[in-house]
Amino acid sequence: MQSYDLVVIGSGPSGRRAAVQAAKLGRSVLVIEKGSRVGGVSVHTGTIPSKTLRETVLNLTGWRERGFYGLAYRVKQDIEAGDLMTRLHKTLEHEVETLEHQFSRNRVHMLRGLASFVNPHRIEVQVEAGESRTVEAARVVIAVGTRPLRPPHIPFNGTTVIDSDELVELTTLPRSMTVVGAGVIGVEYATIFSALDVRVTLVEPRNSFLEFIDRELVDDFVHQLRDRGLGFRLGSKVNSIEFENGQPVAMLEGGRRVRSEMLLFTAGRVGATDTLDLPACGLTADARGRLTVDPQTFQTAVPHIYATGDVIGFPSLASTSLEQGRIAACHACGEPLPPAPAFFPYGIYSVPEISTVGLSEEEVRKAGTPYECGIARLRETSRGHIMGLNGGLLKMIVSIETRRILGVHIVGEGATELVHIGQAVLNLGGTLDYFIENTFNYPTLAEAYKIAALDAWNRLTPRKEAVAEVAAAAP
């Protein structure tokens, strides 16, 4: 029986980062992956596939050029599922090769099979039918991720009623689609298929969605989606799904019906912990298969066993999962940890993108902090006009008392890239003056920061003080 300093179960973002970090610290590391290839959900059915499909759709449809050339503009007139899958498979192959090379050069051992605990330090791995291996672990990181929730009353069939994992294996594109669940995954896929000119209806039992996003951003986002024909059925629970002429019909509470060629169910995910035999190591998962951890060290109730990534719940982002894996590995190896930054960005790869960092206006108001907002429309920038942007905004929230940046929220083209400027200034304790006093490349979308800062400055600074400041700055 082989012994290791660290055994990582799962090779998604948090698992692979934990493994590589521990290996760089000189520890012996084994990664156990149940899939045929490394990468986990992130590479094979989640993050990378959805973002690849998004980019492929935007390129083939000519979406970014429609502001100038009209809604009928297309780069490729007849787009088929095969067009999307070709680029997806090429991208995934590259990701897998990169990960395998990373493990190899850092001397991380790999074992493919289904892992389950024998006791808190011993793990059995079913490598082939009827065959198993047992390994000993001084420390363990559980990074098994999640899988789509599949309620028994939803008649999944792999063709017309599918979950998000099955979506990446499409053989035909539907002309209409119902998306049940307006979480991040549902919103991303609903808007991606809407950009393909598929008629999409988004169904959500709650009266609102994306509650962790600033409401003004969501309002602008919804306006853009309604403007291009995406339908919303908020506050509508799906009681059942029936079939008419082979097409799924969502029967909503209150009697409404939504019929489409395809129904995508994205209302929740569950931790993939059911096969781990957690009681054998002294752990218990919640009703959704998730594990509870110390948010500073990511230790579970059993101190030498850590859990990271989607299996511990919110925020369930690839970016935060990577950092969780690094922190868990460092702690497991006895290495000191720097304090975590106060704020990290959220990115939603919808069409248009949404990205946010810091406090929302609702959170600032609830805290009782005196504040002001600055708004910039992306079409106000020269670069935005050149690109033909009609929508999108950048919102900056500023403390009235200290002029420090409290939050930056962006919806529109390039939001997930632009947000990092605000992230840096926010975490470094910067103020509104940084954006006013510094020069930005011209023309760029980043100029929206200066426009938003000046908008907030106009609201913060009384007329006489503003004139005095301008006079003092004059040569």
Image: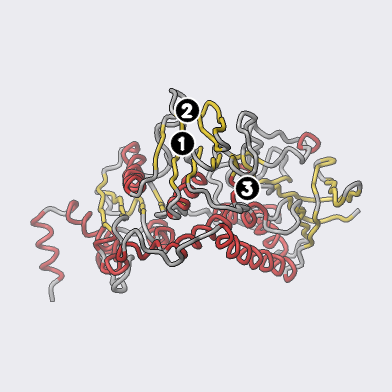
Q: Amino acid at mark 1?
A: Val
> Can you identify the residue that label 1 sits on?
203
Look at the picture and state if 306 lies above or below 69: above
Q: Amino acid at mark 2?
A: Leu
For the residue carrying disc 2, how many other residues have a C-alpha within 10 Å: few (<14), some (14-19), or many (20+)? some
Sequence-wise, the earlier of marks 2 and 1 is 1
Please state, as top left, top right, bottom left or bottom right, where the C terminus lies in the image.
bottom left
Numbered circles on residues, count: 3
Secondary element under disc 1, as helix, strand or loop, is strand
Look at the picture and state if 356 lies above or below 233: below
| In the foreground, 171 or 124 | 171
Colouring method of the image: secondary structure
Secondary element under disc 3, as helix, strand or loop, is helix
Q: Nearer the viewer, mark 2 or mark 1?
A: 2
For the residue carrying disc 3, how many other residues have a C-alpha within 10 Å: few (<14), some (14-19), or many (20+)? some
Disc number placed over residue 166 in the picture, else none: 3
Do the residues under discs 2 and 1 have CB atoms within 8 angstroms?
A: yes
Q: Residue furthest top?
A: 254
Sequence-wise, the earlier of marks 2 and 3 is 3
Residue at image x 43%, y 50%?
194
Q: Is residue 37 left or right of residue 47?
A: right
Do the residues under discs 2 and 3 have CB atoms within 8 angstroms?
A: no
Counting from the top left corner in percent of width and height, residue 37 is at 73, 59
Residue at image x 38%, y 46%?
359
Q: Is residue 308 visible?
A: yes
Cα gap from disc 1 to disc 3, whole angstroms? 19 Å
> Can you identify the residue that label 2 sits on?
252
